[in-house]
Structure formats: C-alpha cells, structure tokens
Amino acid sequence: MKSVRQLAHSRWFYFSKAPSVCRNGNQTRSLSTSSSRRTVMPAWVIDKYGSNDVLRFTKNASFPIINYPNEVIVKVHAAGLNPLDVSMRGGYGAATLSMKRDPLNIKQSGSEFPLILGRDVSGVIMECGLDVKYFREGDEVWAAIPPWKQGSLAEFVVLSANEVSHKPKLLSHTQAAAVPYVANTAWSALVNTGGLTKEKCSKKRILILGGSGGVGTFAIQMLKAWGAHVTVTCSQNAEHFVRGLGADHVVDYSAGPVEVPLRSLDKFDLILDNVGGDTERWALELLKPWSGAKYVTLVTPFLHNTDRLGITDGMMQTAVTVGVKALKVRLDVWPNADVVY
C-alpha cells in the first residue's frame, strides 16, 4: 500500500505502449491490441470513497467502448492528477455527479464503481465513431475529462470528439497532460465568468488569491500576456516562482493576515479566489467601487450542499447562500460589484 500512496501523490502515471491495431471495415470498426479482442485493460480504480487506501491497481478494468457516433477512444500516453481527483476520491460531488451519469435514476446506488480518476490526458486516438469528422486514428490529442466520466488513470479512455483537441506538436505527452484541466478552469474563470478579454484587459488590476497553484499559474501568464497588472498571494517559498511567471506584486500570506497588506494597495477590477473560506469576509472590500468590479471564486458551496442535503435541498441551500452574499455585497460593500461562483 506504500507504493499506492506514493503513486497517488505523484503527478504522472505512465502506461506501457503495447502495440495496437485499428481496423476500419466498410460496415464495422474494430479495435484489437492482441490476437483476441480486448475486453479488459490495466487501470487505477477505487471501489468506494475514502482515503488513499481505496486506490487499487487492476489489470481487469472494463475496456471502454464507443456508445455514440461522436465519440473517440484514446490510448493514454500520460495522465495528470488534480486536486479535484483527490476530492472525488473522498466522495466530493458524488450526489451531483451520480445524477449527471444517471439522470433518470435507473441504476443502483454505487453504480459508478469501479471508478477511474484522472482529469487530464494526452494520448493517441485509436478509434473514431462514425460521425467524427475532425479526427482520425493516430492523431495525437489532449483533453480535460469531465468529472462524471471515467478518467485517464487507465490504458484507454473514451471521450466525445468535442472534448478533445489536437496536441501541440511542441509539447511532449508528459508536458501536455499538465495543461488541459487547469488551463480550461483559468480560462473559464477569467473569460467566461470574469468577462475579461485580450482587448479589455490592458492596465486592469487583478488580484489572484492562491496564485502558485495550477489555476493561478496559468491565470498569471494569461493576464500578463493581455497587459494586466497582477497581484498574487502565495507563500514566501513560491514568490520567486510567481514573479518569474510575470506577477507584478506578491504578498506573502505566511507572514501574517494577508488582508492587512492588501488593504494598503489600490483597489482591484477583478479578484480570482482559489482559496475560499475566510477570504470572502474581507476580499470584497478590495474591489473598486462603482466600476463593475467582479469577485470570482472557484470554491463553491454547491457540491458540498448536494452531498450533505441531497440534490433538491442542496440546490435550494446554495441558491439562498449565494443570493444572501450577493445582496450583502450590493447593500453593505460595493453596490456595483458582482459576486460569481
């Protein structure tokens, strides 16, 4: 079990590059990596939610199959672990993700097991559904795997064609598997939610709380490429690292209450919160008033509430929580600020 723990804390998982053959017939499309048709594959799985002890390596995980004509099968060359995978191992989001997997509630409870984790993948397409037009067998691709699907800690994974894209040729598979999930999260937070674009970002003041993690490091680089002024909170050990990525100002959260030095700085146009918890109490005070400033947090109560209360009650509790916080911001802090979860 010691080796399992070591692997669980490692960023990368590698799988053997066994020879594989993809055959396209006139009517059917088959995939074989041996003299007999593959029905199983090696993978890291969990059979229940818990700590690292629930991780199990098996050579008999079910081989993925194409169920829809727009799906592809990818042979995994490199996979990445994210904090979300660690949380999912412990059952985080189980209620909501089960509803997404089985919206009609036909299957029995626990039907997601054995569950394969891993949200990042880089590999080669081995088989395409009949409606797939932009990919073909042999294409090198990368993807961020939705959390309700089986993950990348396996030899093969099946995905929708709109969930994968061609891997940049300059990146190795190992390098590519470090990018998709955190990059997509950073883009979604800053662009889709925060409303920032290359044209509207110049000289804006952005604060990133917890800037030395995966999402923070991508956010720093994106914002600096677009001309923003970026302030970052991180530990003293990470200061040199984030400055190397382009951060203009760094505040060490380990030196004392981080809100104290932040209050002495000019106000911000957008705050990206990767920390959550107590930060909501004081972060809103750092936004520019009457300017449409936004506070975007990646720490939402939704999944915790649905896990604790069930889908319906959890959704209602989340709506009340977010609504009260948004109302408090408009009445007590800055009338023109937005709070986005």
Image: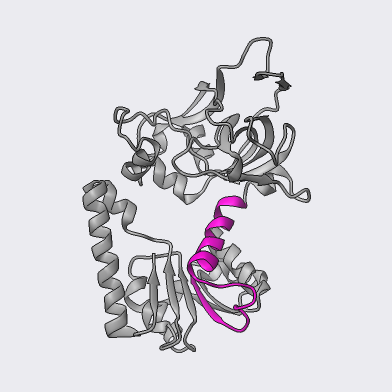
Quarter-of-image position of residue 241: bottom right
In the rendered view, how is the structure colored? one colour
Left or right: residue 291 versus residue 25 is left
- Which segment is the magenta one? 179-208
Closest to the observer: 249 or 281? Answer: 281
Left or right: residue 28 versus residue 91 is right
x then y, percent, for residue 29: 66, 21
The N terminus - image quarter? top left
x then y, percent, for residue 17: 70, 27
**Any part of residue 211 in sight:** no
Count of all numbered marks drawn on residues in the image: 0
Residue visible at 47% across and 86% down? 267
The C terminus - image quarter? bottom left
Quarter-of-image position of residue 33: top right
Left or right: residue 104 versus residue 254 is left
Quarter-of-image position of residue 123: top right
Q: Does 88 appear above or below 201?
A: above
**Any part of residue 196 in sight:** yes
* Furthest residue in direction top, as rendered: 35
Q: Is residue 170 magenta?
A: no
Residue visible at 27% across and 76% down? 327
x then y, percent, for residue 254: 45, 71
